[in-house]
Amino acid sequence: MATRIVFTGGSGKAGKHVVPWLKAKGYDILNVDLKPLDCPGVNTLLADITDSGQVFNALTTHFGFEGYDQGQVPGRPDAVVHFAAVPRVLINPDNTTFAVNTVSTYNVIEAAMKLGIRKVIIASSETTYGVCFAEGDKDYHHFPLEEDYDIDPMDSYGLSKLVNEKTAKAFAMRYGADVYALRIGNVIEPHEYPAFRGFLERPMSRKRNAWSYIDARDLGQIVHLCIEKDGLGFQVFNAVNDTITAKEPTAAFLKKHCPQIPLKREMSGHEAPLSNRKIREVLGFKEEHDWRKYV
């Protein structure tokens, strides 16, 4: 069982919820970020992970002052969770977004593999499905969106995540490691649920997110399940909650609002168009935060 985890980007929107969730499960965690995280018992190492040397150092350092009491140099962590990134377009110039996200991911996975760490979980994105940051109104190829979809983003952020998945697969094959890429949906924090009323009133406003979302706390569960599940090699998982953000059943909703987009298989009930069937069947994910509890 993995006990020591280096988590990059724990101070971000998703990470600040996932890290405490994992801490409560008993993991010893070092956060690596450009700014501190307010989480008791978790130290933040301020590091620029676009610098390979800093990444190697971050994966071979004490997690806190208590490490010096052990009388030996720090050992490698059991797993690395890599969430650090430029989080979307229009924060930095496009070339910077692409460069930071791809180089940092390469650095993290390379360092982990060469240090003998055989479990890495990286944050990919719903944007790889090509609609979120598309120019104009682009249609999905089909529904549901599952992990075998022909991802085709046209923006610098989504493209960086596509490249990161290829990087992850290459290292997993070369080193015989488990590297899991989470295509994370629109992250919803607990205080953001009032916005769902607007989503229901303006349903097409959620097309770019495929009418799907991930509660930040449920994302913690998904990361935990990935850490605990060994032997899968390279895998991609949609990291989203179970249901569509609409009042109608999914099939009826899609027929009404996207009649031109084919269904690859039958979609029953309120299944999210960005489907999490794989994480439910392979990892045993059970959501705890259905949006209907809060709206």
Image: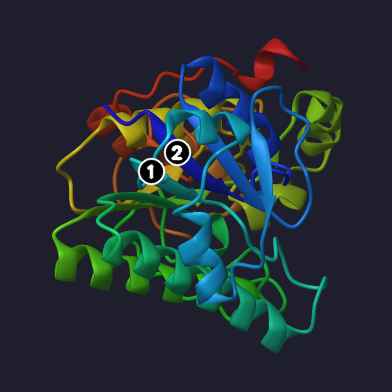
The outermost residue toward the bottom is 95
Relative to 293, residue 87 above or below = below
Task: Tell me the quarter of the picture where residue 111 sits.
Answer: bottom left
Q: Is residue 209 left or right of residue 13?
A: left
Residue 77, which numbered label?
A: 1
For image coordinates 51% across by 65% down, the residue present is: 55
Q: How is the image coloured?
A: rainbow
Amino acid type of disc 2?
Ile
- Placement of 10 over or under 82, stated as above or below: above
Residue at (44, 54) in percent of width and height? 60
| Type of amino acid under label 1 | Pro
* Quadrant including the N terminus: top left
Q: Is residue 150 visible?
A: no
Give the image quarter of residue 87. Answer: bottom right
Q: Which residue lies at the image location 37% right of the left edge and 28% below the top edge?
A: 3
Q: Nearer the viewer, residue 233 or 250?
A: 233
> Residue tagged by mark 2?
5
